[in-house]
Image (cartoon, coloured by chain):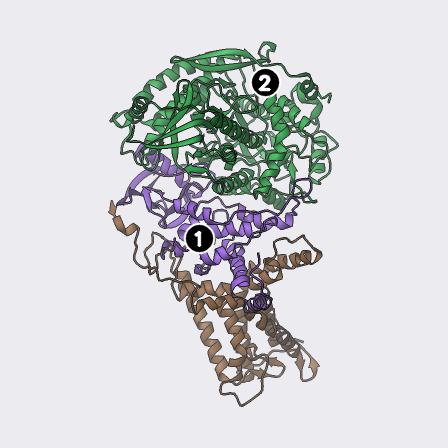
Chain colours: A purple, B green, C brown
């Protein structure tokens, strides 16, 4: 049996969707179909991929309009009678075909205040309990596929790239903020540069996360609450003013 | 040459997996200016796929462990062909490198008293692998990536591929690369190059590697005149997925067996008991009862008092055993063995300890590993052989060239133990960074790159655009993969290897006629065409080295020489370029010093 | 071949390649939420039939019996719970999607523009005070539980009717909704970086773990409790007006 892939072909100047027919086999994923097209019909069809096992987060695309990892999207999820649309991520500029320019994300990462550990024990190592790191290990599962960044309407529709870090980097900040060894504070970063207030917690990031990280509930909202602690809670603000204390270090 | 984008660095690191990142961090810390080249985006290198853990004798989980035991395990696992000084450095330095990662933010799973938890793995006598569930590699690469991003002095070039190294009077002086995004060439002028390009898995059809692993570093070093050693030793990981076709080769972590998973054939027999080699007989359980007690003790967090299950034998042994079961008609429906953890551990424990495996099988193969066995079979996984380096500095035999990680040879001998590659990246990535920075600082001369040479290479790289209607690069690559699997696979023979050499000639001729469509901007067909040159070089090196080693040892199995031969026990097979010809020599390995010999023999 | 050129980058409102009925969920959610709000407003405005025997409508609890107010007392009573819900992290998602279409659904184009301020400007910046509304509504819980006790009082003797169970269900749902609150979870223990560092922190970790389990179901409790509040009011109202008779179970 065959399926039809309707793939975006083009670059920054524009392009069009083009149909390709690929034979189906058991267990086939969309990335297999793309590879088939490359090998047989369009050797210059651009797409990113690496591990093909949902572990590296390279093959992000929009399949029938939904942000997905192509290597983890089975062809048998779709109606064989209908063409399957495969388009590049829309929140980022297209370079060519399914490849887009995600370099902005790497720039955002550079601006996040880095990990700053407390001094180690006398033997040069650190002690941490599993219960202290369980929460952070969820965030460390992130494979940087940037599907959450793609689907986030603040970046996708409102184009706030200059003032908003996006869900991926809130997850990263959460992994640092809640790290039991870290002594730095990133609430000022979140409030002033990260733009966490622009997030209106509509949860699309959580819906598309291939690692099932509960981005909104476990990372963004707890960070919003920490920002409230330091910037909005009137009682705390009054207390700090009375005691002439600055924000938590 | 002015028409090419040009950059200057003290140290150019090629490859941004664990070894490349660690080398870049160290070189920058020494004050060198560093260019770091990634073939993909930063953080996507194959290190993310490492699942089981990083081997380091921290002795947190079992106090009897020490660097000596780690050294002994590594040497015995490598069938004594290892560069013993590298194995010693690995065992001694790995614990400090792992703890250092914690200081950079890594979060390994914990013991009840808050230290780094360690798990059992094939070939390691004690629980030794620091891990994070089954995504240790991701944790490491993210930690190193963030350290890199915040290390001043490192410029990162993403989606950039090095096509050729440049030399000036016998020394490394630069590299010619192209950017995938634009197809434009970039010239890097540098005093030192650290190769950290990983392996050669894409030379085989069934493999656990991504498209990047085309032996670039091996071929770049070879072309630059460096020695390659141990190229006959290609590790076939015993447990890759075998079904469905689209996931064939994807790795199933050894951690499944470390957590108590067992291998069975189609008759329900735990066949590994029949495959325990003489050398390891004293260390492995010979009854299911004893093996099960070991698992029960280890899971309960107690120190094991009985011998370990034979499923935890080294990878070469397990891979051959599965291949033999399949050959003798006791394979699973799709030509593998059954790996069963469902009947050994509780579903919630499996999901906690092996989350990625659970997800991988559930989503890609419709198998729930908490209820059903997995079907697994050997998959090309790792290259033990590589650039011959000095153990202390990782310097190759060409001045200014360094190599670390999978692309470097020697450390793992004839077979690598699981978990040793991640410690390899850290220990020798750092040493390569130190070595390259020191070399660059010490060398005051003015190095030139030859403009005409660059123009000539550029023209050669662009040739496929002129071959309208030429060979399809994907088809040639496919042909190479099929050929290598058939003739230079897990079981080899003189006649097969000779066939492979003549097939390689035909493939080389086809590769010369490869044509691509479209333009230079992000053109995967062209990228495959460029990579073919490297794949053909390493495939030939593997074939010639395999032909030279007329014995079976570790990962190298010759059906026409099924036993290990004393004459080959102390020699490396060295591949190097003389003119345009690939030559193969046997060279003796320096003898093991007495102190280390006593450790290996278990007397210390 | 379909030519899209610039359209891929700058789609009009509602544009998407999604093939599923993405508009059903926000539409349905918006309609149900609007119905519940409308009913609650109507019921709160009635000022009658909210009390019968031991049963008290939750929309009127705690019961204030002053007659000099210009509006029914329920409006004063309901203000904190209404604001608690209005600033709730779950309901925010629901109404931003259904009513503000910001976004209408994931990967569906909305009205574009750079004037978007999210929760950084008035009035939405006030969402940051959600924790205080949690504190205030938390004080309602003892009254709501005492309503359950009162609902077992049938003219001085103990009993259980269908209304008792409905009021019990409602109070339970409201309690679960309160304790699954994101702000509560933060204050209970989420604001700690080291759970194991002291005995007090370990106790807070235990509480936080339980709050986290509830928090995963915050959406469920948000809907359930809204239905039970309206349902309990309706039941009391029907019994009080004599439209139905409360079946006595015990």
Above/below status of A211 relative to A43: below
Crowdedness near tag 1: few (<14), some (14–19) or many (≥20) residues, C-alpha within 10 Å: many
- The percent coordinates of residue B14 (x first, y second) are 44, 30
Residue under mark 2: which chain is it in? B
Above/below status of C218 relative to B405: below
Q: Residue furthest right?
A: B305
Above/below status of A63 relative to C242: above
Crowdedness near tag 2: few (<14), some (14–19) or many (≥20) residues, C-alpha within 10 Å: many
Residue under mark 1: which chain is it in? A
Q: Along the line of sight, which residue is nearer the eye, B20 or C91?
A: B20
Above/below status of B556 relative to C168: above
Q: Along the line of sight, which residue is nearer the eye, C152 or B224?
A: B224
- Can residue B583 be seen by looking at this rendering? yes
* Front: mark 1 or 2: 1
**In which quadrant of the rendered view does residue C204 lie?**
bottom right
**In which quadrant of the rendered view does residue C50 lie?**
bottom right
- The percent coordinates of residue A234 (x first, y second) are 54, 69
Say yes or no: labels 1 and 2 on the same chain. Answer: no
Q: Along the line of sight, which residue is nearer the eye, B527 or C240?
A: B527
Q: Which residue lies furthest to the top in this view?
A: B567
- Residue B81 numbered mark, or none: 2
Counting every numbered tag in the picture gives: 2
User: For mark 1, what is the residue?
Assistant: A165
Say which quadrant the C terminus of chain B sits in.
top right
Q: What element carries label 2?
A: loop
Residue B443 in the figure: left or right of residue B258? left
- The percent coordinates of residue B241 (x first, y second) are 51, 33
- Can residue A213 be seen by looking at this rendering? no
Q: Is mark 1 on a helix, strand or loop?
A: loop
Q: Which residue lies furthest to the front in this view?
A: B444
Say which quadrant the N terminus of chain B sits in.
top left
């Amino acid at each position: 049996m065959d399926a039809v892939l309707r793939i975006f072909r083009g670059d920054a100047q524009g392009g069009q969707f083009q149909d390709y027919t690929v034979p189906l086999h058991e267990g086939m994923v969309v990335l297999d179909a793309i590879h088939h097209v490359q090998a047989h019909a369009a050797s210059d069809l651009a797409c990113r991929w690496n591990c093909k096992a949902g572990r590296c987060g390279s093959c992000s695309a929009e399949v029938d309009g939904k942000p997905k990892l192509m290597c983890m999207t089975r062809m048998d999820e779709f109606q064989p009678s209908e063409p399957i649309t495969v388009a590049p991520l829309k929140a980022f500029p297209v370079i060519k075909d399914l490849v887009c320019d995600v370099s902005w994300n790497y720039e955002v990462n550079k601006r996040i205040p880095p990990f700053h550990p407390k001094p180690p024990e006398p033997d040069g190592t650190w002690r941490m309990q599993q219960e202290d790191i369980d929460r952070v290990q969820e965030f460390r599962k992130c494979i940087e596929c940037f599907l959450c960044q793609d689907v986030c309407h603040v970046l996708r529709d409102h184009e706030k790239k200059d003032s908003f870090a996006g869900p991926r980097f809130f997850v990263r900040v959460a992994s640092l903020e809640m790290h039991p060894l870290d002594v730095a504070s990133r609430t000022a970063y979140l409030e002033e540069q990260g733009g966490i207030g622009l997030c209106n917690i509509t949860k699309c990031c959580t819906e598309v996360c291939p690692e099932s990280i509960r981005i909104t509930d476990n990372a963004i909202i707890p960070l919003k609450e920490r920002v409230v602690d330091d910037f909005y809670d009137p009682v705390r603000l009054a207390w700090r003013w009375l005691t002439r204390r600055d924000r938590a270090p | 040459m002015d028409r090419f984008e040009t950059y200057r660095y003290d140290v150019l690191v090629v490859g941004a997996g664990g070894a490349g990142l660690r080398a870049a961090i160290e070189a920058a810390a020494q004050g060198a200016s560093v260019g770091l080249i990634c073939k993909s985006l930063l953080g996507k290198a194959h290190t993310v796929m490492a699942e089981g853990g990083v081997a380091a004798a921290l002795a947190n989980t079992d106090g009897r462990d020490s660097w000596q035991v780690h050294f002994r395990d590594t040497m015995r696992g490598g069938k004594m062909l290892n560069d013993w000084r590298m194995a010693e450095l690995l065992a001694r330095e790995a614990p400090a490198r792992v703890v250092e990662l914690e200081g950079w933010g890594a979060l390994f799973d914990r013991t009840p008293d808050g230290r780094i938890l360690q798990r059992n793995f094939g070939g390691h006598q004690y629980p030794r692998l620091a891990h994070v569930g089954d995504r240790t590699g991701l944790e490491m690469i993210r930690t190193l990536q963030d350290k890199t991003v915040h290390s001043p002095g490192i410029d990162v070039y993403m989606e950039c591929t090095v096509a050729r190294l440049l030399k000036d009077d016998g020394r490394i002086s630069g590299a010619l690369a192209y950017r995938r995004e634009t197809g434009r060439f970039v010239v890097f002028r540098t005093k030192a190059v650290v190769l950290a390009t990983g392996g050669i898995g894409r030379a085989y059809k069934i493999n656990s590697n991504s498209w990047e692993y085309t032996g670039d570093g091996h071929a770049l070093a070879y072309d630059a005149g460096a020695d390659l050693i141990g190229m006959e030793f290609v590790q076939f990981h015993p447990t890759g997925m075998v079904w469905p076709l689209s996931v064939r080769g994807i790795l199933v972590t050894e951690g499944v067996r470390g957590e108590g998973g067992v291998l069975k054939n189609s008759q329900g027999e735990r066949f590994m008991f029949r495959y325990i080699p003489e050398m390891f007989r004293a260390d492995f359980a010979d009854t299911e009862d004893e093996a099960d007690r070991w698992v029960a003790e280890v899971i309960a967090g107690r120190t094991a008092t009985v011998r370990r299950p034979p499923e935890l034998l080294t990878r070469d042994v397990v891979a051959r055993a599965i291949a033999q079961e399949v050959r003798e008609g006791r394979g699973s429906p799709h030509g593998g063995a059954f790996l069963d953890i469902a009947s050994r551990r509780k579903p919630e424990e499996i999901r906690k300890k092996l989350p990625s495996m659970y997800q991988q099988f559930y989503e890609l193969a419709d198998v729930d590993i908490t209820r059903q066995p997995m079907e697994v079979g050997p998959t090309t996984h790792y290259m033990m052989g590589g650039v011959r380096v000095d153990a202390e500095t990782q310097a190759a035999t060409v001045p200014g060239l360094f190599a670390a990680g999978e692309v470097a040879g020697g450390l793992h001998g004839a077979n690598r133990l699981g978990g040793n590659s991640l410690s390899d990246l850290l220990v020798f990535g750092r040493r390569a960074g130190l070595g390259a920075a020191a070399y660059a600082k010490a060398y005051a001369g003015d190095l030139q790159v030859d403009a005409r040479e660059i123009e000539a290479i550029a023209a050669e790289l662009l040739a496929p655009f002129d071959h309208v209607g030429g060979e399809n690069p994907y088809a040639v690559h496919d042909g190479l993969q099929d050929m290598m699997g058939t003739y230079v696979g897990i079981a080899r023979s003189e006649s097969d290897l000779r066939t492979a050499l003549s097939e390689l000639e035909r493939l080389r001729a086809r590769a010369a006629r490869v044509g691509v469509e479209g333009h230079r901007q992000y053109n995967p067909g062209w990228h495959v065409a460029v990579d073919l040159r490297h794949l053909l070089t390493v495939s030939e090196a593997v074939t010639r080295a395999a032909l030279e080693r007329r014995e079976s040892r570790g990962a190298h199995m010759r059906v026409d020489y099924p036993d290990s031969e004393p004459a080959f026990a102390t020699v490396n097979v060295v591949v190097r370029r003389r003119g345009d010809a690939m030559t193969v020599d046997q060279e003796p390995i320096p003898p093991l010093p007495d102190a280390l010999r006593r450790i290996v023999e278990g007397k210390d | 071949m379909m030519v899209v050129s610039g359209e891929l980058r700058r789609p009009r409102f509602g544009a998407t390649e999604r093939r599923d009925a993405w508009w059903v969920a926000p539409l349905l959610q918006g309609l149900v939420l609007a119905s519940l709000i409308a009913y609650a407003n109507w019921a709160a405005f009635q000022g009658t039939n909210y009390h019968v025997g031991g049963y008290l409508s939750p929309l009127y609890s705690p019961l204030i019996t002053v007659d000099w107010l210009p509006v029914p007392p329920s409006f004063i009573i309901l203000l904190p719970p209404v604001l608690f819900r209005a600033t709730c992290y779950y309901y925010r998602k629901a109404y931003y999607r259904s009513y503000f279409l910001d976004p209408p659904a994931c990967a569906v184009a909305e009205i574009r523009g750079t004037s978007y301020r999210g929760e950084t400007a008035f009035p939405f910046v006030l969402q940051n005070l959600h924790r205080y509304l949690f504190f205030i509504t938390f004080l309602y819980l003892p009254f709501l539980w005492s309503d359950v006790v009162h609902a077992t009082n049938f003219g001085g003797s103990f009993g259980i009717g269908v209304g008792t169970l409905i009021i019990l269900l409602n109070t339970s749902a409201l309690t679960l909704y309160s304790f699954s609150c994101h702000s509560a979870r933060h204050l209970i223990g989420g604001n700690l970086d080291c759970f194991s560092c002291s005995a007090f922190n370990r106790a807070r970790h235990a509480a936080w773990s339980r709050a986290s389990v509830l928090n995963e179901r915050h959406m469920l409790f948000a809907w359930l409790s809204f239905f039970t509040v309206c349902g309990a009011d309706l039941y009391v109202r029907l019994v009080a007006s004599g439209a139905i008779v409360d079946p006595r179970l015990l």
